[in-house]
Amino acid sequence: MIVVLDEDEALREALRFSLETEGYRVSAFGAASELLDSDQCSGAACFVIDEAGCEPGLTQQLRRQRVPVILLSSGGRRPQRTRLGGLISVVEKPLITDALSRRIAAVVQ
């Protein structure tokens, strides 16, 4: 299960479609509060999160679970990365290559 969190609905749905065509089960959320209120956190193999949506409550939850996190970054939000410790990878936007797919494959194996 790959959990996607991105406020941008078009990008979120494109990621869902792309990852499902690669054979992953995907749960997608538009806000950290929706994700925290669901039971999907406990069953995830990997989180793909827009760095802008990485709120403190979500950061704490992810650190407790020790599940790999891939941050989608537009650059500049370095403090979010340090709060997650060594569990994160970063893929820069725009997503015009297969960097995200390769990163997911690397962390879920």
Image (cartoon, helix red, strand yellow):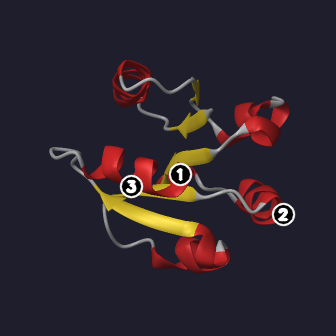
What's the amino acid at mark 2?
A: Arg
Residue 103 is tagged as 3
Q: Are marks 3 and 2 in contact (CB under 8 Å)?
A: no
Front one among 88 and 30:
88
Q: Nearer the viewer, residue 92 or 54?
A: 92
Residue that mark 1 sits on: 109
When the figure is inspected, residue 100 is found, relative to residue 34, above or below; the finding is below
Horizontal placement of 20 versus 84: left or right?
Answer: left
Mark 1 or 2, which is nearer the eye? 1
Tag 2 secondary structure:
helix
Marks 1 and 2, how far apart in space?
A: 20 Å
Q: Residue at x 57, y 57 (%)?
A: 69
Using a 10 Å C-alpha cutoff, classify the residue at mark 3 as few (fewer than 14 neighbours), some (14 to 19) or many (20 or more).
some
Mark closest to the chain's N terminus, 1 or 2: 2
In the rendered structure, find residue 64 and report the number of the disc placed on it: 2
Looking at the image, residue 40 lies above or below residue 68 = above
Residue at disc 1, secondary structure: loop
Residue at x-position 60% and y-position 78%: 86
